[in-house]
Amino acid sequence: MLEIMIKNLEICEIGELLQHEQTMDKNIMRLKEAMLNIGQQVDPLIIDRKSRAVLDGNHRLKVLEIIKVPRTVCQLVDYGGEQITIGGWLPVTERLTIDDVKNAGLKTEEVDFEAGKRALDGTRAAFMLRNQEKDECCLISPEDYDLHGMIEAQKNVLDKLNNKEKFMYIADDSIELQLAEGRTVLFRRNFLKKEVVAEAIAKRPLPPKSTRHMIPDRIIRLNMRLGWLHQTKEEATKYLENMLHDRVYNGNVRRYTEPVIVIY
């Protein structure tokens, strides 16, 4: 296990990493305070080995930039492999109806659920509203879009509706429960891996909460001291390897083979 971790963990220069998703100010403030209080980078950033796009940890990357830590510890993954999958986060609210959407000045088109999903996958709408309890389903801002047009249309929809509703963002694999409890879900198209990489390379980060990556054997609770990350890359790597050796030797590393719930 030690050899596998050393192979997949790397000390990287902050400036060589590519942000793929925009950050949220409130999350930056909370994370900055926590990171400075404990003096550690708790979890490694997850990055694509080939492109250096940050798949998970964009807020951590931004905080490290702000507090002027020059290096970071990353877990390198092969993003092109089938083991890594990509999902998303969906806006969910308690009361939103089709009439509310129309009253916000947005165009709608009533559809059945499966036809609506096909329209989203074909970038022919910004969102699809679904409320199972009220039996409501409609496309929001139906139109043929390219990628960037779709992103702008989604932003416009959320800007207009946020004046009326407060959205939660729920992982797309948990959305059936939200529908069953009578909430309104705004479905949207998931981004493709090639789009994530292309936008990161072009320095056009996607909107916040755009992607949700499922990473097998994700390393958490590494607890890399920020002071070590101010050393040279070679010195920081040696600190990292020594720490991993000690923790493996002392039995402080466990690989979970089942899904886990982490309480922060």
Image (cartoon, grey):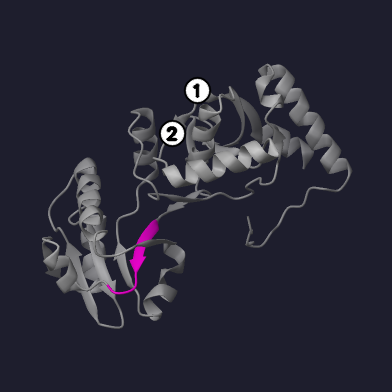
Judge by depth and name the residue closer to the eye, 167 or 57.
Answer: 167
Question: How far across and how far down the image is residue 112, in percent?
Answer: 21, 74
**Where in the figure is residue 137, as x and y percent of width and height?**
22, 73
Q: Was residue 93 drawn as part of the magenta stretch in this picture?
A: yes
- Badge 1 amino acid: Glu
Residue type indicated by callout 2: Gln
Asked if marks 1 and 2 touch (Cβ < 8 Å), the reply is no
- Check disc 2 and report the residue beneath it: 19
Report the residue at 63% width, 36% height from top. 36
Residue 120 figure quarter = bottom left
| Mark seen at residue 65 | none
| SS state under label 1 | helix
Out of 59 and 245, give the one closest to the viewer: 59
- Say whether residue 173 is left or right of residue 260: left
The quadrant of the image that shows the C terminus is: bottom right
Magenta stretch prevailing secondary structure? strand
Figure check: 252 above or below 228: below
Label 1 neighbourhood size at 10 Å, few (<14), some (14-19), many (20+)? Answer: few
The N terminus - image quarter: top right
Residue at 17%, 55% in the rendered image:
124
**Residue 74 x %, y %:** 60, 34
Which residue: 11% across, 62% down?
107
Q: Residue at x 30, y 79 (%)?
A: 132
244, above or below 152, in the image: above
Few, some or many C-alpha atoms within 10 Å of disc 2 (few <14, some 14-19, many ≥20)? Answer: many
Task: Determine which residue is flagged by label 1.
Answer: 16
Residue range of the region highlighted in magenta in the rendering: 89-95
Q: Is residue 77 visible?
A: no
In this rendering, the count of numbered labels is 2
Q: Is residue 181 visible?
A: yes
